[in-house]
Amino acid sequence: MTIELTEQQRRIIEGQSGRPVEVVDPDSQRSYMLIAREQFEKVRTMLDDSSSAPASPSQISLEIPPGIRRSQEAFWRDLPELLKQRKLRGQWVCYHGDERVGISKDDAELFQRCWKRGLKDREFDVFLIEELEMPPWEPEEMDESLFEAVEIDESGPTTKL
Amino acid sequence: MKILDRLPLLTASQSIGFRQRHVSFHRNALVIWLSIGRRGNKNPLHISPAFPAMLDSGNNSACFLHEHHLIQWAGIQPNQLETIGSVRINDQRIAQLKADVWIHPNVPGTHEHDSQRLPFRVHIAKGLAVGRPRPDDNTLFPRVPLLGFSALKMNALDYWFDSKTGYSYLRTADWRSRLVRGLYRMF
């Protein structure tokens, strides 16, 4: 979206010789700083929240809670039998440790059933009944994606891939 | 149900703002809006605020984002979500967390999210893949959250790209899916 300057505003900006101009919304009294596009491009990366993050240690554990792990082992043990029943494919099955809580077409219904029993999220897991190459707890290979091409502009020959 | 209607490819690089944050998206990207919710909870009032992400057919994880996105963008502390597995990417092992993703419908013909319509819950059976901060490197990877096509398959969502207009469409599968599939097979 672009807002066109009035003749008076253009003259004021030219008179500032490149210095930022403060613009105020008379209704909200909120103020904005108006700067030239070239200046904005220089500070853009500082404003961009996706360029970097503080290097802090991860807060995420790689360890699967024992209750979920036992549920995964029970599912992996039962999966061949579940797959033999074709009508179950594409449905969801829930395990609380060794116990099969239920099978449903709606995964949320199984979660509700567990929560009603007072189970915590770390004590059960819900699985899609489908062919699996490896047990759920084994790390799967993932491709690095998101190769982004940034086009070269006239202000500098920077290309990032 | 229509979820994405005439979603355009970005015609130019653009800074997209949300809640005092600004994120660059580049030309030809497909920008969508996601939220994260507790796995199995169908109530859209209990999900995170919406944040921008990219629909990425090259990503073989259902949903891949960085810990920074989870904490700062979605406002979710990692200890609220249980680890249910892991994936290996570039020899780095990263956790998969138990959560659902919600896709917000767009305002037809734009990449803006339509706050008047309810988001659609997408179950991610294997969990969200969440990238970790890397020692001596504060660049984010992935730079923006990604939604892969396996999430669409797992949730029976039909995606269609119209090459003439550059628009994308996403909707729940129904009788039209069978019709379109039949036409493709026939011709």
Image (cartoon, coloured by chain):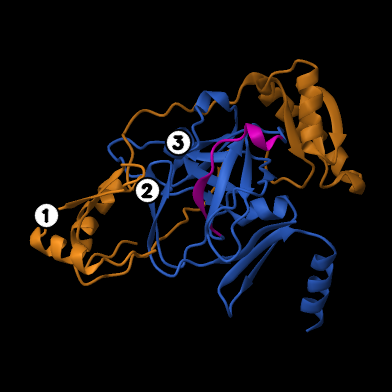
Chain colours: A orange, B blue
Residue drawn at 42 percent across, 66 percent down? B27
Q: Which residue is mark 2?
A: B22
Q: Which residue is mark 3?
A: B67
Residue B39 x, y percent position in the rendering: 67, 33
Point out the stretch of residues depicted in magenta: B43-56
- Quarter of the image with the N terminus of chain A in it: bottom left
Q: Which residue is mark 1?
A: A19
Q: Is residue B65 left or right of residue B181?
A: left
Q: Is residue A145 left or right of residue A81?
A: left
Question: Which badge, 3 or 2, comes first in the chain's sequence?
Answer: 2
Residue depth check, mark 3 versus mark 2: number of the one nearer the observer: 2
Q: Is residue B58 left or right of residue A22?
A: right
* Depth check, front residue: A47 or A127: A47
The chain to which mark 2 is attached is: B
- Quarter of the image with the C terminus of chain A in it: bottom left
Q: Are marks 3 and 2 in contact (CB under 8 Å)?
A: no
Q: Are marks 1 and 3 in contact (CB under 8 Å)?
A: no
- Marks 3 and 2 on same chain: yes
Q: Amino acid at mark 2?
A: His
Q: Is residue A16 left or right of residue A27?
A: left
Furthest residue to the bottom? B187
Mark 3 surroundings: few (<14), some (14-19) or many (≥20) residues within 10 A:
many
The chain to which mark 3 is attached is: B
Secondary structure category for the residue under label 1: loop
Residue depth check, mark 1 versus mark 3: number of the one nearer the observer: 1
The chain to which mark 1 is attached is: A
Q: CA distance from mark 1 to mark 3?
A: 38 Å
